Amino acid sequence: MSETKSPPEGTAAGADVLELAPERKLPEPEERQGLWKKLQRGLLMTHTELIDKMSAAVAGRTTLDEETLEFLEEVLISADLGVETSLELVERLRADLRPDQAVDFLKVRERLVDEMSVLLLDAPPPRRPAPGSGPRITLVVGVNGAGKTTSVAKLARRSQLDGERPLLAAGDTFRAAAIEQLELWGERLGVEVIRSAPGGDPAAVVYDAIQAARARRADHLVVDTAGRLHTKEHLMKELGKIGRVVEREAPDWERRTLLVLDATTGQNAISQARTFTRVVPVDGVLLAKVDGTAKGGMAVAVARELRLPVVWLGVGESAEDLVPFRPREFAAALLG
């Protein structure tokens, strides 16, 4: 039987914990400016490397000849955009240029931003439920070590900032460390965590969490799930059981599944995503660890090669470091 994590000392129990969710404090323009700065910081290393290499590629050249375009392909590939995506971007650039057209580095960058934005929009648009539109459940999946549990906490914090009442479910029952980590986040955020003993049934945790969310009138139930791809059959069965519980116990709730990918692992994350999407229906991607050490370009490869919309970017260690993914702003931070 699952148990409810007690609220932090000094806070009220049950629904009162959820009532402590802070109101949105920042006006939209100021908030967008702050998120833009976080995104720029997260992509700074990639941005600097790309601009330096692209500058070197066109230095001393009067036209964008074939040799220069091939070098640009290599530069984009090195930023984890993927081979197919990089080739398509340069092919679109090539189609717009006359062989004798003079090099204008700023216009080349602007054109690449435009084309990158188009590629990012190739994926189906993510569903963004309006805050307060009714109870919903988010199943968070991903391989162990990708930043999944921390991303669960960030999603809960985002709900708080939207004036909602979140609840967390520790469904990764096969890793005691994941349960403990989520409990720590729950204490920091003042959010209740539904859990079981390590090794318990994840579907039973989700069942108890749905009942608790309904009793507490929570708006958003965020579920941390197991991420053991090396036992795909077991993972499939576990997630299948969770899905059946949700359909039976909360048939009228909006439900979506987010895949967490570690941006620092580059093309390896793309391979993981391909494997994962064969096992689990995925609605969108949360790209974690876009914190200055990641190449960043893999967001474009996810949209272009996997046809998955990127919904969120994790751009730091704090609970607030979650940025809504906006294609044009992302492309501009990467190349603008």
Image (cartoon, rainbow, N blue to C red):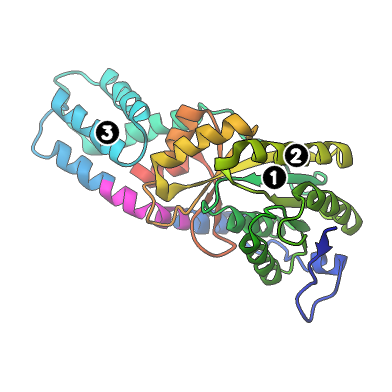
| The N terminus: image quadrant | bottom right
Q: Which residue is mark 2?
A: 255
Look at the image and tell me whether residue 65 can be seen. no
Question: Regarding mark 3 in the picture, which secondary structure is present there?
Answer: helix
Look at the image and tell me whether residue 150 can be seen. yes
Q: Along the polypeptide, which appears first: circle 1 or circle 3?
A: 3
Name the side, left or right, on which 217 lies relative to 306: right
Name the side, left or right, on which 147 lies relative to 241: left
In this rendering, the count of numbered labels is 3
Q: Magenta segment: does it hold 202?
A: no
Residue kind at label 2, given as amino acid type: Arg
Q: Are marks 2 and 1 in contact (CB under 8 Å)?
A: yes
Q: Please provide percent x and percent y for residue 51.
A: 26, 45
Residue kind at label 3, given as amino acid type: Val
Q: CA distance from mark 2 to mark 3?
A: 41 Å
Q: Which residue is mark 1?
A: 139
